[in-house]
Image (spheres, rainbow, N blue to C red):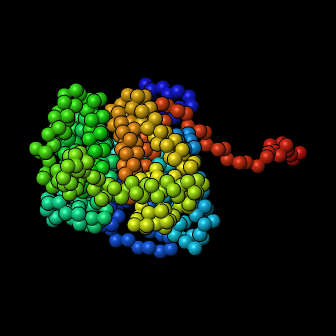
Amino acid sequence: MKPSTRVGVPAEQPTPAALKYLLVATVFYIPNQRMFPDFSLTGLNITNLLFLALLVLILRRRDVAPPSPPLKKQFIAYFLVLVWGFLIGQLYDGSKMFADLQVLKNAVLYMLLYFLAYYGACDRKTMRLLFYVMLFTVFFDTYLGLRQVMDYGMGYNETRRVAAPFSWNSTDANRSSAYYTLYLVPMAVTALYLPRRLLRWFAFACVGFVIFVNFFTYSRQSYGIIVVVLLLLAVRRSPVLVLVLAIALVNYHLWLPDSVVQRIDMTVKTKDVVPGEAEPLNKELDTSTESRFIIWGGAAQLFIRNPWGIGLDNFHRRIGEYAPDYAGYDAHDYFVLTTTENGFVAPIALLALLLGLFRLGRRVEKEGREPESRLYGLSIWLGTLAVAMINLYGSRFVDGNLMSNFWILAGMTARYLQIVQGTPEAAPKPARSRPRSPLAGARTPSA
């Protein structure tokens, strides 16, 4: 006897093989594209071709019409904020219109992966495959980082910091650390909540592997975010884990590599001793940390004079007006960057989008009864917190190579929510037909 189904609630649709494998290729390719030969025509490269191919395959599936995706309004609102920033920039200076247009296109394009994953990943099996491919991609990129550690050695050197998978240039080290920190989240969630014990132990080993390699990016921000993420997971999972983590943190000098301890201790530096001066006054922030406060002060003055924004991609062009020593620098904080460039509405739209992603993860975790519900839900809401923290000390929100898999994970999680809730899919549009003649079917006199 066939199981009954409710009227208006169709079963999940199988994902076509071509669409499935294109999504898999996208998950692995975008973070690792520097390792592949590329070609560049006018605005056309492999990433754009993948995007177009996914879009064409999705549009061809006219028989499937899922409900409108969650967070659609929040995404559109932030896209409008970016377009506003672009237009403001052209009013100030239109000489770099094509460069600004490229920045706008890249910012929007990678975020649209959320919608491609929502409409493309149509069944649980495909979602599970994409999730594991993301974990494999993190493992592979961590292996690339380990190769850099072995080549550089474990001594601290500002010009020999791990920058995999993006380059072998230490200027990408903070970007690399943000990548490892963000995608450590789904790996750690898998280690704690995957039902299969053997795979959980393997995931635990991978978590340790990612943390070890991330040490040698020497990004102190990432160290703090990893601690917050692991503590939040430990509090939810077991008091014993909380105790173990607390003991490890208190005694970090005993087990961390010496170069990492040295880097942590560099957050404050010792000034020349002044006779009669109190000891606490003998400390100051290191140059890297201090520079950020100077840049943020200049950004505040820019915002006060231009509350409607200075224009997309104009921060590095204008920060020298108020922080001459840092002309051409990035804001090192995406909330500061988007507010200065796109105006006072930008942080409101950004926070609305982040809050929506957080609530999406919480809903999936609570409403689903399958193991994947907890894996996807926790990965999204905790990953959203990681994204917010990463962007407090860096400008990574529209970094496509870094954020692409997060948008894909969010999109397929939104579709998973629709499946587990049994939301009726929209009926396909009926084909248009010609009006029937009143004489159609009438008998002729000869008949």
Residue nearest the observer in this picture, 197 or 206: 206
Residue at figure coordinates x 41%, y 53% from the top left: 333
Residue 11 x, y percent position in the rendering: 48, 35
Residue 113 x, y percent position in the rendering: 46, 52
Count of number-bearing discs: 0
Quick one: which residue is furthest to the front in this view? 276
Q: Quadrant of residue 411?
A: top left
Query: Which quadrant of the rendered structure holds the C terminus?
Result: top right
Asked if 370 appears above or below 109 in the picture, the reply is above
Residue nearest the observer in this picture, 347 or 211: 347
Residue 1 x, y percent position in the rendering: 43, 25
90 relative to 243 in the view: left or right:
right
Asked if 100 appears above or below 65 in the picture, the reply is below
Residue nearest the observer in this picture, 53 or 194: 194
Residue at figure coordinates x 20%, y 34% from the top left: 246
Quick one: which residue is furthest to the left in this view? 254
Residue at figure coordinates x 38%, y 58% from the top left: 401
Residue 260 visible in image: no
Q: Quadrant of residue 424?
A: top right
244 relative to 108 in the view: left or right:
left
Residue 243 visible in image: yes
39 relative to 254 in the view: left or right:
right
Residue 115 x, y percent position in the rendering: 50, 49
Residue at figure coordinates x 24%, y 38% from the top left: 191
